Image (cartoon, helix red, strand yellow):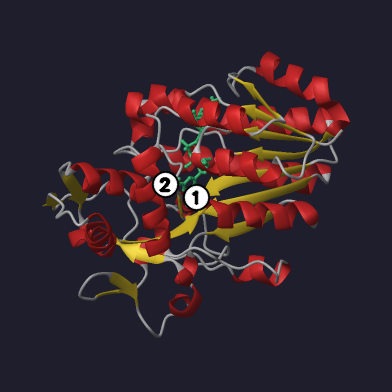
Amino acid sequence: MSVVIITGSGGLIGGAAASFFSKRFDRVIGVDNDMRRHFFGDEASTRWHVEQLRGELPNYVHHYADIRDREAMERIFMEYHTDISLIVHAAAQPSHDKAADIPFLDFEVNATGTLNLLEFTRRHCPKAVFIFTSTNKVYGDTPNHLPLEELETRWEVAQDHPYYSQGIDERMSIDQTKHSLFGASKVAADVMVQEYGLYFGMRTGVFRGGCLTGPKHSGTQLHGFLSYLMKCAIHRTPYTIFGYKGKQVRDNIHCDDLVHMFDAFFENPRIGEVYNAGGGRFSNCSMLEAIAVCEMITGNRMDITLSDINRVGDHIWYVSDLSKFKAHYPNWEHRYGIEETLVQIFNEFRTRPT
Ligand SMILES: NC(=O)c1ccc[n+]([C@@H]2O[C@H](COP(=O)([O-])OP(=O)(O)OC[C@H]3O[C@@H](n4cnc5c(N)ncnc54)[C@H](O)[C@@H]3O)[C@@H](O)[C@H]2O)c1
């Protein structure tokens, strides 16, 4: 029997991975305790998504278990043992801002939870491929020191800078920079995933996400930028932009594009590898540009407040360079741009059972 374990399976990435890999594996084991609801409140609950997966995927088995719970996690690994050939670890406390209110919980989920899964992989299925969803916040606010130019609707890196053509690559330092406590707990996990590869020879891959997006996100103010923005546009909820005149640029990768990256890595894995994984030059937008697209799709004028105060350590301009991944996996390419993704999010909100 072939088994994949997916943590955070109620979330955006875990859910997309569960749907995709259910066609490839005999059994998909999802782990998610709906902690997103605990972090962000009822509107962010991912239980609806878990129930949808249970209803739609006949080979999906769910555990409402906590990745911090070592006994519960080890029981799952012991049950399937070497039948497990892939672990997609996407459970997390995912918010930059939230982490400062809950530093212990943030670290225990993001860092210790990851260590638990790595160690049980080593003990019970050391040949399995282990995929970790890291973040561009491991680079801290170093990107804010790039030479940036202000354009009409966005900040942009100077045209003569090496990052102009493709974006930021994996060689940017993760040291001596302001990460936020979230970024720091993810650094701990990111380095540990690399270490289980480099030290034990395990097939571990770190994917440092830009903004991850897609229709099944349970968007909320503190996390899930495009999903929450579209929700506000549909319901005409006031939306506040924090700092940088709304011209801050994020690259956004559709969850299905990211899952295809995971699949390429699974098919041809490497040891302790690290990739930047965002929308890159193919799919990026500033806040102002994203608002304009939401207004066009919904036909609603958004109620926007522009605050002068930026979120601590927030990126002004971040675009991922995916050249390394593309060199290793030349058949992979982006498929979904900003506008198409926002249309999908809009359509999803009209049918979602929340
Ligand atoms: N969404 C983004 O923009 C973004 C950007 C960069 C990196 N990432 C990373 O990608 C991963 C997936 O992000 P997402 O957007 O799908 O997040 P998400 O919040 O939608 O999904 C995470 C899921 O993990 C679950 N979870 C949290 N703590 C848990 C615990 N202790 N035990 C079991 N389940 C738990 C939550 O209930 C949630 O359903 C995370 O590691 C996140 O840090 C996300």
Q: Residue at x 62, y 41 (%)?
A: 19
Q: Relative to 53, say whether 21 is above or below.
A: below
The x and y percentages for residue 341 are 42, 57
Number of labels in the image equals 2
Which residue does the numbered mark 2 point to in the structure image? 179
Which of 96 and 30 lies nearest the eye of the viewer?
A: 30
The x and y percentages for residue 280 are 48, 67
Q: Residue at x 41, y 59 (%)?
A: 142
Sequence-first tag of 2 and 1: 1
Q: Would you call the spot at circle 1 few (<14 residues within 10 Å), some (14-19), or many (20 or more)?
A: many
Which of 45 and 177 lies nearest the eye of the viewer?
A: 45
Q: Are marks 2 and 1 in contact (CB under 8 Å)?
A: yes
The x and y percentages for residue 322 are 57, 67
Q: What is the spatial separation of the Cα atoms under label 2 and label 1, in whole angstroms? A: 6 Å
Q: Residue at x 26, y 47 (%)?
A: 311
Q: Relative to 236, say whether 64 is above or below.
A: above
**Residue 237 location, quadrant:** top left
Q: Would you call the spot at circle 2 few (<14 residues within 10 Å), some (14-19), or many (20 or more)?
A: many
The x and y percentages for residue 65 are 60, 19
Q: Which mark is residue 138?
A: 1
